[in-house]
Image (spheres, rainbow, N blue to C red):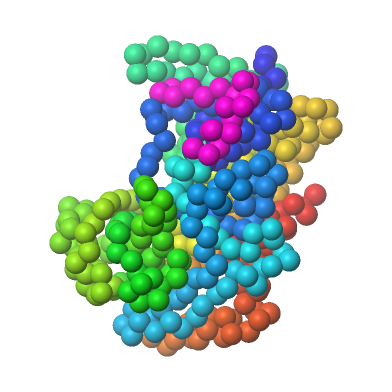
């Protein structure tokens, strides 16, 4: 049986995990169902903690170079447009090599990782391979994939890392539960070229609070690197997909939430359902879950891709140790102990709290939340602690400390 590693999925988690393994001399085979990396607007924030992790495999410099660096983020009331809290990542100076967040589209992060992987001939990427069968024994893992022509392909490895998303084939085959819930409302991401910074003092990361029509507004590099703004809009229960994907509906929402941009041309729109789930285990024998196959959450705060990349690098280190004889297989139990409880404690809790803060229904409860956020921003100690959590620096440190 091969001593190499099989990875299902060539997204950010799969590509970066594979690169980390290849850099250590471990043969890696990445099987991807899609012909190319999707460019639909999804994850775009890379936090300080993840950049620190990516320092260790030489990716952070290029990611920062291609990104928009966001030092600040702010919260506003929708109805008055008042900024009631602003946070400054520079408060993390001394705690991280990167006291900021960066905005870069997910597919560009993948491209950077795959370009770096070209330096390693033992890193192989095969596209248009759909996983259809998975078995394992005490010696290794066997994966069967099917290509569009109907041909079946056999792959063998010492371990398999499932980075195949929320509908993970590997997780289902292994019988691992995926408890949690799905939000009633769907989310719409709208990309425009409207300059919110020039129009109304927006930072590069912004949250707009309202009991019904909350939103977030972020700047990303865009196709030409010159800048594009993405707005996240909730679609309430009872609003049909057909209605909400029209430019008319989107412009009506902009008129309510962002009136100065109400007539801006729409460059792109992406509608999707949102879930909060954490797998009951992150491993099953020689099969490991990382990223969305292990945990999914709403996008507020940019937790998903970041925690997934951190899963992958953490796991890669353990596979390297075992392959080199520096640790026995009991180290894999530590992967589950380090990553799964903290996905619940930080990723799930923080993303749910972010959403509840923006859309608090009861006026008294909402005012209390907003006042608490304002006080947190104004107090230097609480300000820094808030950023330690929201940038996942605290999560990474706590995870690494678990024995």
Residue at image position (19%, 67%) is 263
Horizontal arrangement in the rendering, residue 399 relative to residue 237 (left or right): right
The span picked out in magenta is 111-131
- Residue 282 visible? The answer is no
Residue at image position (46%, 62%) is 300
Does the magenta portion include 137? no
**Percent from the top left, x then y, of residue 264?**
22, 64
Which quadrant does the N terminus fall into?
top right
Front residue (pair 185, 55)? 55
**Percent from the top left, x then y, of residue 168?**
47, 36
- Residue 196 visible? The answer is yes
Residue at image position (82%, 34%) is 327
- From this view, report whether residue 83 is shown above or below residue 309: below
Front residue (pair 400, 183)? 400
Residue at image position (50%, 39%) is 110
In this figure, what is the number of numbered marks?
Answer: 0
* Residue sticking out furthest to the top: 151
- From this view, report whether residue 311 is shown above or below residue 195: above
Does the magenta portion include 119? yes
- In which quarter of the view is residue 204 placed? bottom left
- In which quarter of the view is residue 323 placed? top right
**Percent from the top left, x then y, of residue 186?**
32, 57
- From this view, report whether residue 279 is shown above or below residue 257: above
Front residue (pair 247, 184)? 247
Horizontal arrangement in the rendering, residue 364 relative to residue 72 (left or right): left
Front residue (pair 203, 270)? 203
**Percent from the top left, x then y, of residue 124?**
56, 22
């Amino acid at each position: 049986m091969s001593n190499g590693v099989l990875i299902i999925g060539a997204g950010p988690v799969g590509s970066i995990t594979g690169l980390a393994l290849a850099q250590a001399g471990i043969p890696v085979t990445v099987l991807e169902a899609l012909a190319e990396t999707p460019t639909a607007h999804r994850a775009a924030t890379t936090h300080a903690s993840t950049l620190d992790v990516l320092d260790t495999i030489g990716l952070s410099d290029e990611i920062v170079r291609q990104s928009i660096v966001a030092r600040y983020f702010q919260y506003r009331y929708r109805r008055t447009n008042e900024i009631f809290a602003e946070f400054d990542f520079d408060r993390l100076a001394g705690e991280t090599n990167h006291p900021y967040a960066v905005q870069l589209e997910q597919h560009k992060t993948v491209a950077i990782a795959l370009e770096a992987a070209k330096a390693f001939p033992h890193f192989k990427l095969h596209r248009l391979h759909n996983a259809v069968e998975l078995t394992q024994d005490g010696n290794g893992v066997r994966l069967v994939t099917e290509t569009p022509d109907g041909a079946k392909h056999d792959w063998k490895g010492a371990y398999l890392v499932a980075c195949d998303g929320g509908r993970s084939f590997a997780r289902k085959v292994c019988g691992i539960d995926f408890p949690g819930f799905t939000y009633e409302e769907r989310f719409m991401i709208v990309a425009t070229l409207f300059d919110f910074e020039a129009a109304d003092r927006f930072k590069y990361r912004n949250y707009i609070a309202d009991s019904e029509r909350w939103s977030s507004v972020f700047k990303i590099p865009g196709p030409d690197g010159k800048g594009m703004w993405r707005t996240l809009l909730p679609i309430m229960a009872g609003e049909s997909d057909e209605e909400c994907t029209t430019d008319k509906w989107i412009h009506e929402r902009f008129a309510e939430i962002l009136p100065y941009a109400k007539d801006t041309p729409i460059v792109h729109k992406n509608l999707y359902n949102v879930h909060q789930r954490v797998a009951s285990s992150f491993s099953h024998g020689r099969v490991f879950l990382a990223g969305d196959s292990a945990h999914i959450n709403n996008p507020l705060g940019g937790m998903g891709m970041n925690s997934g990349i951190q899963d992958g690098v953490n796991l890669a280190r353990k596979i390297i140790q075992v392959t080199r004889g520096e640790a026995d297989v009991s180290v894999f139990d530590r992967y589950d102990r380090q990553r799964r409880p903290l996905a619940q404690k930080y990723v799930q809790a923080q993303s749910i709290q972010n959403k509840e803060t923006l859309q608090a229904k009861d006026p008294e409860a909402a005012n209390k939340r907003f006042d608490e956020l304002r006080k947190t921003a104004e107090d230097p100690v609480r300000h820094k602690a808030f950023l330690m959590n929201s940038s996942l620096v605290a999560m990474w440190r706590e995870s690494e400390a678990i024995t």
